[in-house]
Each structure stands twice: as structure tokens, then as C-alpha cells.
Image (cartoon, grey):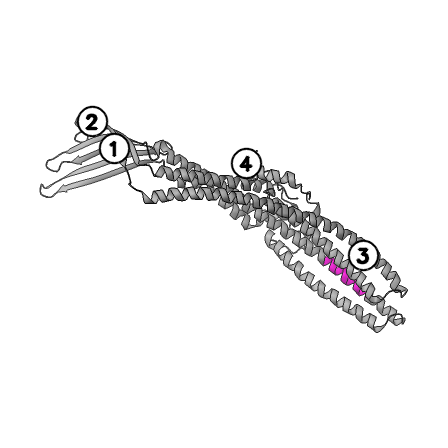
Amino acid sequence: MKKKPFNIIAVFVIVSMGLSAFAENKSAKSRTTLTMEEFIKTAVKNDESFEEILAAQLALKYSKDLALPAKDLILSVKGQNEFYINQDRSDPGIAVSLSKLFPYAGSEISAEYSATPYSNSKGVSSAISFYFSQPIAKNAFGKAVGLQDKITGVETKIAAYQITEAYEDYLALTIVAYYNWYLAFENLKIGHSSYEQSLKLLENIKKRKKSSIALDIDVNKIKIQVLGKKENLIALEKEYDTSFNLIKQAIRYEGADILKPSNPFKFGESEVSFKEEYKQFTDSSRTYDILKLLEEKSSLNVDKYADNLLPSTNFLFGYQVSGLDFGVKSSDSNLFAGLSLKWLFSDQAGRANHEIAKISDKTTFLSNRSKYARFESDLKNLFLQLEREKKLIETGAEKIKLSKLILADETTNYSYGKVSLNDLIDAVNRIDENNFSKLGHLVRYKILITEWLRITDRLVSSKNLAVR
């Protein structure tokens, strides 16, 4: 079953409902934690980029009014006074007409009243006429307008989908920004802890030196270790400040509180079933709907330009009453029917447009076949990356567990002089490296999940924010 076109306004209402206490009380001193849900809701509420996406959708409802012939009722009034210089007189003249086009039938009807002064005598002649025109070749019974209506409808659907895609891209960037902030925050915590542990180790080594258990070179080695940790901490602080500035910009935060992220890995599930989700993508995604609509549009364009090659042929019917004075006195009436034909021989531009439309139709079909294959390949590769990150996360957890055991043993061994200080330093650094590595793979996995949902058009739905 095809997915219905997504309504950005509906999502805005859903996202805005029940906005968090953070959005309402972001100046409260007690508020320090900003969850991912709160961040997304507040960003959607405060970021002008989202309002810009909404504004683009509002313009879509006027697309047909611009693309199709006007079906307005047209009133035309003309009044004049004619001066006959040689006859030393003047007479008034008037013409009033009312016309209406019925675009979907191609029909046009009009009624006119006119009063015109005689040029060689006093008085006016008047007439009332009714006129009907119906195309029977080019735009026969509104065929061209019907085709243009369908083309405009397809274009509007595509534009609506593209607006949804723009919001989904915006949302993906917002989510990734939070993940990067969390990564920088946790890395900074690891960096601080590592630096503090190095300072404690330095104090321990200094005490051992005073007891003549450690040497000056041991103290200097730990000092180098401390400086290295400090240098790394400075770099981590810079990364955190940069990521936090992006967070504040997204939610337009101007409060004085120090915000911190919560663990985003509890924010929904994080498993992908390739076979099931790929089938859902091919059956009901916006992306596939857009590609099918593009094929439909190119086929309709072929029909449109083929219709333009037909001669402009209209069936005409009219009735007229003419007489004297403004009241149409002493009137005569006549009825007429016939055909009007306008044929552009050769029509070089029209035939060229028709051929180009046929080529474009074939090109669109071939391009879509290529895109289908590329989507499958890209999603398979993305799925493989997800599986790889899962294995690396599991491996990282094992490495952390083992490195902690090794550090405990190396600390004991060093206290008995069984291993060198270098071995102890390596054991300490190994834990930091494994902690940084595992956290990086965790965040990388969540970012890849976000990308998977974005590509498969499942990051945004009409019911909720389907973010894992």
C-alpha cells in the first residue's frame, strides 16, 4: 500500500504538542539536562529553518491556479463619445461583454451588447449577441487542460514530497548534532578522568621516589604522561565547545545554565532487518513514489506535446439580434454555426518539443532503473557498515574489560618491581584508548541508524518522530 503524502503541518503539530519543561523554563537554574527528545522539539519550535520549510509548503496550494487557464467570469465595458467634425454633432457609443471559459471542457461562451453611432446620420445601431466555441482537435473538449492539470498535480505531489525530504534532512542533521555533542561530552569526561588519574599516579611516583623506590626518570616519565593527558584534554574541550555551540544555535538558547546531554542510546531501538525494511522501502517509500511520479510526468508531457501538434479547430455557434437605437428596435436576428481552423504547417518547434519529450520519457525510465539499482547497493553497503560497527562495539567492550584486568595486574606487578613503569603507563593508556574507541563506535552506529532511516524515508512519519 502506497504511503500517503506526508503533511509537514501535521508533524509540526505533533512535535509541538506537550513541549518539554525545558522549552518553557529554560532559564530555570535547576534545569541542566537536555534530552534528545527535548532538543528536537525545542529546535523545531525555535529554529527558523523549520518555519522556512513550512512556508514552502503553503505556496503549493496555488500551483494549479498559476498553471491552468483562468476560469474567471470576465466583464468588459467600453464607453465612448464620437465627434463628427464635418457634421457638427456627437453621439455616444457603448459596448458591454461578459465571457467565461470552462477550462476542463475547453468551451467558451460570451454575451455582448453594443451600441454604435451611424457615421452618415443621426442615431445608433445596436446589437445583442451570444457566442459559443468548442475545440474539437487541439485541446479537444479540454484534453490539453486535463493533461496540464494532471502534470501540475504530479508536480505538486513531487514538491510536497521534496518539502518532506527537506524536513527529514533537517531533522537528521539535528539528531546527528546531538549525537556529536554527546560524544564530545563523554570524551571530555573520559579525558578529565584520565588526567586526574595521571595526576594521582604522579603523586604516587613522587612518594615512591622519596622512599627511594622510584627514580627521577620515573617521575619525568609520568610528568610527560600528565602533560600529554592535559594536551589531549585541551583538544577535547575545544571539540566540546564547538559541538555545544551548534546545540545552542539550533535551539536558540540564551540561558545561563550549563546544559548537559542525556544518554541517547535509549532513544528507541537500534536494530535493522535488511530484507524486511528494504522491501518496505521499495513498496511504499516517498523516494520510490517520487520516481514513479517523475515517470508519470514525462509520459504526460509526451501526450501534451502530441496534442499541441493538432490544428486549432473550433466548432462555433452564435446568435445575434441587431436593431436601431439603444433598445434594439426594429430588430433582425440571425443564427450561425460553423468551424474555424488554424493550421501551422510543418510546426518545426512543436515537432521538436514532441521528440524531446519522447526522449526525456525514455531517459527518465532508464534513469530510474539505474537509481533503483544504486539504492539497493547503497543500502546494502550501509547495512554492512552497521553490522561492522556492532561487531566493533562488542569487541570494544571486551577490550575494555581485559584492559582493566591488565591494569590491575600491572599495578600490582609494578609495586613489586616485576614490570617497568613503561608497562604500567601502556596499561593506563590502553584503557583510555579503548574507552574512546568504544564510545566512538557507539555514536557512529547511531549516526548510521539515523542515515538508514533518512534514506529509507522512515525518519519522519505522519504519526510521530520515528527516530531510533
Q: Earlier in the sequence, mark 2 or mark 3?
A: 2
Q: Give, as a single range, the part of the protein colored magenta.
A: 188-201
- Residue 337 in the image, given as x and y percentages of width and height: 24, 28
- Residue 237 in the image, given as x and y percentages of width and height: 68, 61
Question: In the orientation shown, which residue stands out farthest toward the bottom?
Answer: 216
Query: Disc 2 versus disc 1: distance between alpha carbons?
Result: 15 Å
Q: Which mark is residue 392?
A: none
- Asked whether, in this view, residue 266 is left or right of residue 91, the answer is right
Q: Residue 334 carries which label?
A: 2
Residue 31 visible in this rendered orientation of the protein: no
Query: Disc 4 versus disc 1: distance between alpha carbons?
Result: 48 Å
Q: Which residue was labeled with disc 3?
A: 403
Q: Under tag 2, what secondary structure? A: strand
Query: Disc 3 versus disc 1: distance between alpha carbons?
Result: 96 Å
Q: Which residue was labeled with disc 1?
A: 112
Asked whether the residues under the numbered discs 4 and 1 touch, taking CB atoms below 8 Å apart as contact, a structural biologist would say no
Tell me the amino acid under the disc marked 1: Glu
Asked whether the residues under the numbered discs 3 and 4 touch, taking CB atoms below 8 Å apart as contact, a structural biologist would say no
- Residue 52 in the image, given as x and y percentages of width and height: 51, 48
